[in-house]
Amino acid sequence: MKNIYSNIFKYNKKNLSKAKNILKKNDIIGVPTETVYGLAGNAYSNIATKKIYKLKKRPKKNPLIIHYHGLKNLKKDAYVDHRFLKLFKKFSPGPLTYILKKKKKSKICSLANSNLKTIAVRFPKNKIIKSLLKNLNFPLAIPSANISTNISPVNAFDVIDEFGKKINFVLNGGRSKIGLESTVINLNGPIKIFRPGLITNKEIGKILKKNVLISKKIKKLNSPGLLKKHYSPGIPMSLNCKKIDNKAAFIVFGKKYKKDKNIFNLSTRGNLKEAAKNLYKILRKIKNLNFKKINVVKIPNQGIGIAINDRLKKASQ
Ligand code: TXA
Ligand code: MG
């Protein structure tokens, strides 16, 4: 019997070249990034992009993030301004996605950005995806490697958990370092955070020397990642809980909680970055253990805690 994990390939020269060849044929592979794992395809190809939407069962009106190795290639596809350059210098490569105006002569296929006038672009830092991008002559459309509305994958096995044999090549990069998706910032028109992440509005505000707000209400088409239900374990979830309900899985944070088989601690030392890294891992575990309900304690709403609370809120819709 074929072991499904035979779809997972370790990072070496030979497999990198295999990955490259699959992408050149406009097929889709699973890839690690520092935030979460993604499904990668040629962003210039309508065929590849279509496959991504189909695999993810993603509504076509929800655009993909285009991943680049460097600025030179980006400039063929999007307009950059001084605000972008300042942020790029400070935060890229890394977990920040910029919404920029798309150039008319850009080769990014219109399906990849849902026919919008803008494209979302990111320069990932993970060395595996970076070396892959460096060796390709096209950028990659890479959404998170989960079926639409499900929990995002944070290791190679999660990608197989989502797609089974439908994905037959995943590059293994170990656990995702950050564990939550990139911060998305709008730079087309008024600056706003569309999706909070590790890089906070405060840090961005410092660089731009202005107050940067997190968008609360947003027009549907602007960023469907802000659509209500998302990142969901498919189980009822209650937030800001205080009491332990023995029938529910209890997600906690900090050292005051005892160990038990229904208690899942995001970070015993009360560290928010560690909690972010553990969040999707724990949600997937709880889902696979067939709990019928999840309770979550209150998580401090600062730093990456803002992004954790954003995902928890959407997961609980
Ligand atoms: O960390 C990440 O960003 C991961 C890794 C794999 O790079 N990718 C990721 O992609 O989270 P995805 O497809 O799961 O989320 C992309 C988000 C969605 O909320 C989408 O609506 C938004 O970016 N987006 C993409 N293009 C946009 C655009 N032109 N305007 C506004 N929002 C856009
Ligand atoms: Mg996603």
Image (tube, rainbow, N blue to C red):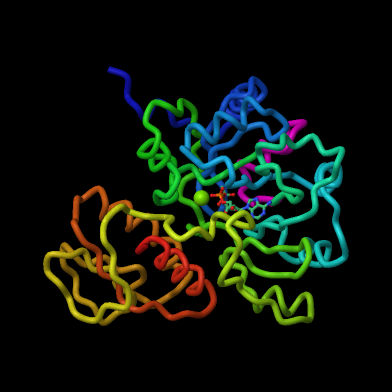
**Residue 149: x and y, percent?**
42, 50
Label tally: 0
Taking the spot 44% from the left edge, 61% from the top edge, the residue there is 277
In the image, taking residue 288 as reference, residue 84 lies left or right, namely right
In the image, taking residue 195 as reference, residue 284 lies left or right, namely left
Rendering quarter of residue 45: top right
Taking the spot 71% from the left edge, 82% from the top edge, the residue there is 211
**Residue 109: x and y, percent?**
72, 34
Taking the spot 64% from the left edge, 57% from the top edge, the residue there is 222
- Look at the image and say whether residue 139 sits in the magenta stretch: yes
User: 154 or 221: nearer the eye?
Assistant: 221
Rendering quarter of residue 39: top right
The residue positioned farthest toward the left in the image shown: 246
Do we see residue 10 in this rendering? no
For the record, the magenta segment spans 121-140
**Residue 25: x and y, percent?**
64, 20
> Which quarter shows the N terminus?
top left
In the image, taking residue 25 as reference, residue 163 lies left or right, namely left
Do we see residue 167 in this rendering? yes
Vertical order, 85 against 299 (above or below) = above
> Which quarter shows the C terminus?
bottom left
